[in-house]
Amino acid sequence: MGSADLLALEAHVRREVEMTAHPRTEWMLPRLHRGKPALDALIVGAGQSGLCIAFALMRDRVGNILLVDRAPEGREGIWVGFARMPTLRSPKDQTGPDLGIPSLTFEAWYDAAHGAGSFAGLNMIPTGAWHDYLQWYRRVLALPVRNGVSAAAIAPGELDDGGRCLLVTLSTGEVLAARKLVLATGQDGTGEWWMPDFVGALPADRRAHTCEAIDFERLRGRTVAVLGAGASAMDNAAVALEHGAEVHLFCRRSEPSAVQRYRWLTFAGFMKHIGEMRDEWRWRVMGNIMRAREGFPVDTYNRVLAFPNFTMQLARPWTDAHMEGGRIRRAGVVRRQGRAVERSLHAAARRGGSAARGLSLSRPRLRLPRTCAGRGALARRHPPVRHRCDAELRAVRQQHQRHDDRGAQGGGGRYAWPVRRRPATALEIAAGL
Ligand SMILES: Cc1cc2nc3c(=O)[nH]c(=O)nc-3n(C[C@H](O)[C@H](O)[C@H](O)COP(=O)(O)OP(=O)(O)OC[C@H]3O[C@@H](n4cnc5c(N)ncnc54)[C@H](O)[C@@H]3O)c2cc1C
């Protein structure tokens, strides 16, 4: 770590923030609620969005603000939690929290922390490094965060001068009056984590959701079923494999989605102007993206393919599961050539048992080609695999094609075609412990 370089960078940040501070005049009038100062803004969540919003407000001289985060200091966001991938999925040159200040970029921080030119040698941003950067960002900008406190309830209120405010009850029981409230609660804030009832009904030590803390060491030598074929499913499968488990990843469809719509939307025209769209269009665009199945990135796929004890089971949805003789048994539907056939098979091996004993290996199993050669290659190798191709798929593919032709950005590229899916939820792991 170049601590001298970091100190120099921090001085540089302060100088650049100062140089770009305009207007400098404080302009917010103090407002009171029951005789006490009300906050101009309360930001719930001190992940990267909350921190960035706080900095933007402070630059505009809205300084009477507070961030609260239920996580302890240093554990905010997802990066040291359930984001179980070695690197970010977004391209390394994607800026954001710096708000256009060069010394605040990840690149500037990384070079100062790891030596000049280090950033140039990176392919993707290591997940832990991104988290460290956000910690530094918070510290160098002196953002006012209270950790270990969650927002529990919100109610309308009235300021002493008759103006409107919101009253936010914290987990401590304290009630804060705020003129504006920002919910920067990330994916946690969009709803409840979900798993099918029959998975939830399994003993708690035999199944887990990817958003939970998972003791992967316990999976060593076991057979693990991963339900779902998105990026988080692959990440969790990879960590289980790295811990010596045999992993079977179950995909409901006959072909996993490889479309990465999120990648597609990361270009300036979209990101900077989606706010200008009419509400109806924003809703439609985001609804379409959220309903689609986000494909897993190539790197993620290659991570699991490095293990011979990884198998992807296509067209093998789980419709039921229960414990029997210490093993997880599951009823499934095997889709073959458009027909659904009810099946019951062992999904996870008995403690210490082999996969063959636990799994019905007579079922048609499909391993994806070990290179990420795309759908055409898959179809040639496995002709019975039927590809979904509805109007939406064609439209989006054309959109991708146009986008690729323009060469707008690297990343997702051609490894992309969409299939509809239910609204995004993280995926579940059913673990045969
Ligand atoms: C596995 C995975 C990989 C991802 N990879 C990428 C990637 O490579 N690139 C990318 O750009 N995006 C990625 N994302 C999306 C990612 O979640 C966001 O980019 C990023 O975390 C969003 O930051 P945020 O601040 O909005 O939310 P978060 O980082 O989720 O932070 C929300 C914060 O709110 C706090 N909070 C929630 N509820 C409350 C409450 N009631 N009271 C107080 N505090 C609360 C939480 O403790 C948390 O610290 C990934 C997501 C996942 C799940």
Image: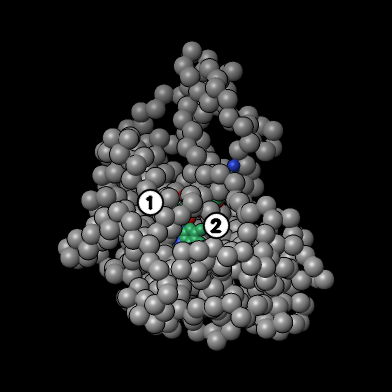
Q: Tell which residue pokes out farthest to the left in this image.
A: 406
Please report whichever mark, 2 or 1, sits nearer to the chain's N-terminal start: 1
Above or below — where is 103 with respect to 372? above
Relative horizontal placement of residue 160, taking residue 53 as reference (left or right): right
Please give the residue where the numbered disc 1 appears in the rendered image. Answer: 289
| Total numbered labels | 2
Q: Quadrant of residue 171?
A: top right
Query: Residue at coordinates 60% horizontally, 50% vertically from top-left?
Result: 193
- The kind of residue on which mark 2 rests is Ala
* Numbered label attached to residue 246: none
Residue 69: percent from the left, percent from the top?
58, 46
| Left or right of residue 260: residue 210 | right
- The residue that appears at 53% across and 17% down in the rendered structure is 158
Q: Which residue is mark 2?
A: 426
Q: Would you place residue 372 above or below residue 130 in this image?
A: below
Label 2 beta carbon within 8 A of ligand 1: yes
User: Label 1: how many residues lie within 10 Å, few (<14), some (14-19) or many (20+)?
Assistant: some
| Residue 209, percent from left and from top | 63, 59
Taking the image as drawn, is residue 103 in sight?
Answer: no
Q: Residue furthest bottom?
A: 308
Q: Residue at x 58, y 65 (%)?
A: 341
Horizontal side, residue 262 vs residue 154: left or right: left
Q: Does the numbered disc 1 mark a residue whose Cβ is under 8 Å from ligand 1? A: no
Measured as percent of width and height from the top left, residue 287 is found at 39, 45
- Please name whichever residue, 393 or 241, is drawn nearer the observer in this view of the structure: 393
Q: Are marks 2 and 1 in contact (CB under 8 Å)?
A: no
Q: Which amino acid does the dot numbered 1 rest on?
A: Ile
Gap between marks 2 and 1 measured at Cα: 15 Å
Helix, strand or loop at mark 1: helix
Q: Is residue 93 visible?
A: yes
Residue closest to the eye, 340 or 392: 340
Q: At numbered mark 2, what does the secondary structure look like: helix, strand or loop?
A: loop
